[in-house]
Image (cartoon, rainbow, N blue to C red):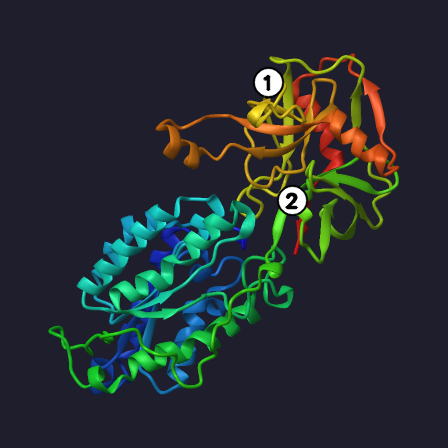
Amino acid sequence: MLGLRITTQRTLGSMYLVRITLAVAAILAQVSAPPDALASEVQVLTFGDDLVAGVGISDIQAFPARLQTKLRGEGLNVRVIDAGVSGDTTTGALARLDWPLADKPDLVILELGANDALRGIDPKIVRANLDAMVVKIRASGAALLLAGMRAPGNWGAGYQQQFNRIYPDLAQEHQTLLYPFFLEGVAMNPDLNQRDGRHPNARGEAVLVDRIAPYVVSMLTSSSDRNHTSANNRPGPITPAEPAPIPPGAPSPAPLPEQRQIKSGTAFAINGTGDFLTNYHVVKGCSTVRLRVSGEWRDAQTTASDEDNDLAVIRAKGSDTVPPLHFREGKGIRPADQVVAMGFPYAGVLTTNVQVTTGTVSALSGIHNDTRELQLTAPVQPGNSGGPLLDLSSNVVGVVSSKLNALLMAEATGTLPENINFAIKSGIVRGFLEANRIDYDVAQSTEKLDPADVGERAAKSVFMLECQ
């Protein structure tokens, strides 16, 4: 993932309020505006998710208001309508598209797909939804500017490639203008994003508008279409017969380098010297690593790694007072034993607090009888990687590492698997730590705590990890 923080602060109700406010403003403007100017006002609909809605900033700082100001500064009589809904997916957006199209906008900026990518929704579904929206928008008579999105890397290269091809393929198929990447120039830049690292701040919104504005201006000032009006006596839509070239003066979007993508996972303290354990795949290829301890991000670095066993140790500055978890000593874990998994799944979408799930050990080996792994039923999701798997004494029995790809299994077998997840056995982990001369603590599992107490006790030692 590229990755984004999704909230529900902005509701449909607030979107209605923005629309009503804009409508009232337009009526008031008629008192002094010349009749010809009012007749030629162009409606631009920004239809999208939280990136359009402007989560975490005021309405006047958000993309629609800034775009309207920018276009009017270019001498265009434009009203930009905000139809962004925070947290929306392409499925939800398709279901509500008819409502804003009923107002007959002249131009639609279609920005969707980020939340689908964060949730790992099948690219085929995303493509079908976007395709249906493109068809509806074109059928309404509106011109269309399709804003591309890119998937984060946590779903694998295959998913990323399939997702990223959706937008150029649709633009070519429907012969419409494509703005290749909506977050171009802003993504991964901490100075242009809010503290979550995923939503643009006010300066970031300004950059988004500055970069996309030449595309919008080019469409609105197309001489072949601006000289006629539609049946409702408004300027006719701008509908390119073929994908338009990048407008003069517009920045040329460049591919987002793989190494700039933010990955997230989980790490937990293993000793009192600031060492934390995680998965190798979480920190692989990252130039910077940081850990969120007590609500603050702390810089860290990888001090030991084992790609074959998918393990890594990082050391975070100023974290030597964090209480470590203990590894289970003595009798080993058995099938049907209860376990607790902890981690930070879907970072930026769900809560920033550690999440706790429960289940049982279902097998003492993984895929193809891999004896380095445990199979478990406790639900895990992207972001759980590197988190501890605990017994009911709150001792570590494994490190959560992966889950079965349900979509691929469904395609291969015709059935959808449930709760098939894996963790690296604590014996493998301890061998890795000993080989690298890294201290760790052990304890006998003599207690039988309630799972809620296990989670509460261990929460002080489990943290969100991000690397870039």
Residue 349: x percent and y percent?
A: 53, 46
Left or right of residue 62, residue 438 in this image: right
Residue 222, above or below 311: below
The three-letter amino acid code for the residue at tag 1 is Ala
Residue 171, above or below 465: below
Q: Looking at the image, how many numbered discs can be counted on the residues? A: 2
Name the outermost residue toward the left: 231
Where on the picture, by quarter, is residue 32? bottom left
The three-letter amino acid code for the residue at tag 2 is His
Residue 428, above or below 178: above
Q: As rendered, which of 286 and 309 lies closer to the eye? A: 309
Which residue has dot 2 on it?
Answer: 281
Where on the picture, by quarter, is residue 406? top left
Q: Can see residue 6?
A: no
Left or right of residue 304, residue 46 in this image: left
Left or right of residue 325, residue 279 in this image: left
Give how far apart the Cα atoms at labels 2 and 1 are: 23 Å
Q: How crowded is mark 1: few (under 14 residues within 10 Å), some or many (20 or more)?
A: some
> What element does badge 1 sit on?
strand
Q: Can see residue 80?
A: yes
Q: In which quarter of the image is the C terminus?
A: bottom right
The disc at residue 363 is 1
Q: As rendered, which of 371 and 160 lies closer to the eye? A: 371
Residue 420: x percent and y percent?
A: 52, 26
Residue 443: x percent and y percent?
A: 83, 20
The disc at residue 197 is none
Residue 323: x percent and y percent?
A: 82, 34
Where on the picture, by quarter, is residue 343? top right
